[in-house]
Amino acid sequence: MSAIRCPDSEYLNRPLIENVEYSIEQDFVHIHSSCTCYIQARCYKEMVNPMQLYKAVSQTATERKIKKSYKRHFKRFIESEWDNYRNSCIKSSSVFDEIIKCARQIQERGLHMGTSDDLKLAEMATLRERYNTFFHGNQVISQMCSIKNSLDDYLKEMKNENDRLCKIYL
């Protein structure tokens, strides 16, 4: 059963909520009052291809005589999914641009008492949910970030003079 919403004109005739702060930039949106955060989101920036990092980790491991296991298939995943990753980044950026547009419209209209009836706020919540789906654990952006973080950790640990790594899993 869907909620019954009042007409937009009725909502706009209600009193404005006081002390709402709007921070809308090209890569960041934050709309909040003293007791409610309506949205806080940051645009995801595409990373550089982690293949160079993969090669650096592999080479450093070889130089330090650390065993390597390839059962996590990082290289295969990076090579096969890089184009999908870039496409997902473009799509997520497009959805974020829609969030920015919607946030600016909300700022122009203002937030009125009874925000559950605000159609633009509901639209922005839907866009935010759509944007967040790009970063679920089973999505290519999340998986690529996880690989990059693992590679960064391996490289950092191997550069440590007192490292205790005996084997890395690539």
Image: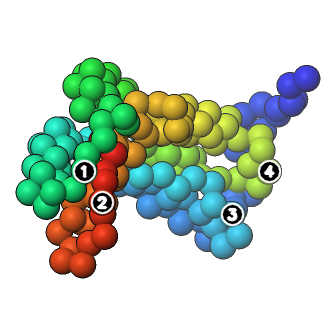
Q: Which residue is mark 3?
A: 36
Marked residue nearer the N-terminal end (4 or 1): 1
| Alpha carbon distance from label 3 to label 1 | 51 Å
Residue 76, given in percent of the width and then of the height, sits at 27, 26
Identify the secondary structure beneath mark 1. strand
| Alpha carbon distance from label 4 to label 1 | 61 Å
Residue 2, given in percent of the width and then of the height, sits at 86, 25
Identify the secondary structure beneath mark 3. loop
Circle nearer the viewer, 3 or 2? 2
Marked residue nearer the N-terminal end (4 or 2): 4
Q: Residue at x 8, y 57 (%)?
A: 63
Circle nearer the viewer, 3 or 4? 3
Marked residue nearer the N-terminal end (3 or 1): 3
Q: Which residue is mark 1?
A: 67
Marked residue nearer the N-terminal end (3 or 2): 3
Residue 114's tag is 4
Q: Which residue is mark 2?
A: 166
* Three-letter code, disc 3: Thr
In this orientation, does residue 14 appear?
Answer: no
Disc 3 packing (10 Å; few <14; some 14–19; many ≥20): few
Residue 24, given in percent of the width and then of the height, sits at 41, 55
